[in-house]
Image: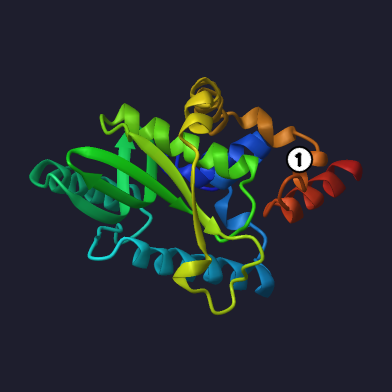
Amino acid sequence: MATKRKLTLSKSAYIRSLQCLKSLYLYKNYYTEKDIPSAELLCRFRQGISFGKQAWQLFPDGIDVAPKSNFTNAITRAAQKVETLLVENQSVTLYEASFCFQSILTILDILVKKNNSLFAYEVKSSIAITPTYLHDAAFQYYVMTQAGREPQKFYLVHLKEHATLDNVSLDDFCISDITSEVKERQLFVTENIKKALIAMEDDNLLSLSKGEQCTMPYLCDFLGFCTKQNQTENHV
């Protein structure tokens, strides 16, 4: 078995767990077995990053506080910097603000502190507000709140209807208030974080068979691993 990575739970890992707990287990313990991403997937990923940076223009003169890497220590240091800036400034805008609570981590796209009130903005390069986006935001709200930084409002920044990712302008952005939806999901988040933290160390999940969870709502990036695993078991 591959050497285990430090078992922290990030937003992306949490979203992965909602689709399949085995996928989360593999991500934490068999990371190198991930499928090679397609050129199309990489292109969409780059578009999403570019769209997120463009959204910064909606809130100019902010401070980029993104962690230098995805490693836990870097995110923790970034979260400490965020806390310092929030304490020192009555009003400030932060890009890629990190928050940590115990072993749970998240990075928010845009955080605005205005007159000592916090306003959270998550950016998605899509027109629709999907259930996954709401779960994503609810997780971030949970971590921020547990870290002592509950936002007064939580917004989703996304594309207006009929807009495309080609030649995006500021007029193509839509800001939707999803605070009530996010708050309604807090019990769900709490329960599923507990499941995810257990699943990361549950070796029994390795025997879970393929199913609908492999492709819904997203194509799992461990599908190749599980396919080979099933083939091996069928020939035993």
Instruction: Please state which of residues 176 and 232 is positioned toward the viewer in this rendering.
Output: 176
Residue 132 seen from this side: yes
Residue 130 lies in what quarter of the image?
top right
Crowding near pointer 1: few (<14 within 10 Å), some, many (20+)? some
Q: Quick one: SS at disc 1?
A: helix
Q: Residue furthest left?
A: 88
Residue 74 image offset from top left, x and y in percent: 28, 53
Tell me if residue 46 comes above or below residue 220 in the rendering.
below
Is residue 2 shown left or right of residue 72? right
Q: Which residue is mark 1?
A: 213
Name the quarter where the C terminus is drawn: top right
Q: Residue furthest right?
A: 235
Q: How many numbered marks, from 0 up? A: 1
Instruction: Please state which of residues 176 and 123 is positioned toward the viewer in this rendering.
Output: 176
Residue 118 image offset from top left, x and y in percent: 27, 40
- The residue under the point 67% across, 55% down is 221
Circle 1: residue type:
Gln
Is residue 33 shown left or right of residue 173? right
Instruction: Please state which of residues 105 and 91 is positioned toward the viewer in this rendering.
Output: 91
- The residue under the point 41% across, 30% down is 142
Name the quarter where the N terminus is drawn: top right
Residue 103 image offset from top left, x and y in percent: 36, 34
Q: Residue furthest bottom?
A: 167
The scheme the figure's colours follow is rainbow
Q: Residue furthest front?
A: 171
Tell me if residue 113 comes above or below residue 104 in the rendering.
below
Residue 1 seen from this side: no
Is residue 181 shown left or right of residue 56? right
- The residue under the point 12% across, 41% down is 87
